[in-house]
Image (cartoon, helix red, strand yellow):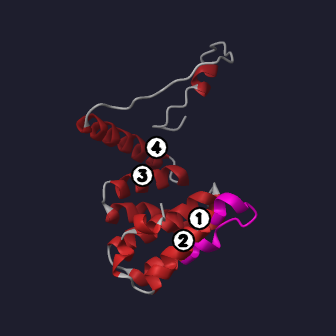
Amino acid sequence: ERPVHEHVLAGLRRAGFPLRVAQVQVRHTGYATAEQVARKKRYYLKLMEDWLARRPGDWDICFRIGHTYYSEQDTARAREYFARILAVGSQAVEPPSVFRLAAVFHARCLIVEGVWAEAAARLEEALQRLDHRVATGRLKDRLKIERALGRLQARDPMGADLYEMGVR
């Protein structure tokens, strides 16, 4: 099984545990301190990096590593992982949403770094990758990306903050 995201069902089946449907809710309260959260994040990052070293074509994990670095504001490291995904092309990446998200987050890194033209190109690429057959959820994505592109093309000084623009 893949690291980090605790999916226990396959392991329970392999171990021969009987499975039953039950009306039970599991609530995870997380960790109590910032230190515990940071320690868990470092641990998970190492698990994912080790996994990716053994399975270099796992584009979902590659994206998750990039996103972890992005969330830590290490845009240079994040961009490395997003660029790996973009380099293989959309046809090689499953699920297709990972390629689109890699393009969006690669652009977000470039915006933070002030590389406007390349960021706009990446957002255009993400826009082209939207599956227009899935109208409702993708329309929201399309509007967010188009709004970000409009702000970038105008070189709005506030364009560095994509959270304000809604590209999340």
State how far apart marks 1 and 2 are (Cα): 6 Å
Q: Nearer the viewer, residue 153 or 63?
A: 153
Q: Nearer the viewer, mark 3 or mark 1?
A: 1
Would you name the residue on which mark 1 appears? 141
Secondary structure at badge 1 equals helix
State how far apart marks 3 and 2 are (Cα): 22 Å
Instruction: Indicate which disc, 4 or 2, sits on the residue closer to the N terminus.
Output: 4
Where does the N terminus fall, quadrant-wise?
Answer: top right
Instruction: Indicate which disc, 3 or 2, sits on the residue closer to the N terminus.
Output: 3
Report if the CB atoms under discs 3 and 4 are less than 8 Å apart.
no
Instruction: Point out which mark residue 51 bears.
Output: 4
Q: Which residue type does callout 1 highlight?
A: Asp
Q: Callout 2: 10 Å neighbours few (<14), some, many (20+)?
A: many
State how far apart marks 3 and 4 are (Cα): 11 Å
Report if the CB atoms under discs 1 and 2 are less than 8 Å apart.
yes
Q: Nearer the viewer, residue 164 or 87?
A: 164
Image location (x, y in percent) of residue 130: 65, 67
Would you name the residue on which mark 3 appears? 65
Q: Is residue 130 magenta?
A: yes
Q: Which residues are magenta?
A: 124-139
Q: Which residue type does callout 2 highlight?
A: Ile
Instruction: Indicate which disc, 1 or 4, sits on the residue closer to the N terminus.
Output: 4
User: In the figure, 114 relative to 41: above or below?
Assistant: below
Report if the CB atoms under discs 4 and 2 are less than 8 Å apart.
no
Q: Nearer the viewer, residue 164 or 133?
A: 164
Q: Nearer the viewer, mark 3 or mark 4?
A: 3
Image location (x, y in percent) of residue 115: 37, 80
Q: Callout 3: 10 Å neighbours few (<14), some, many (20+)?
A: many
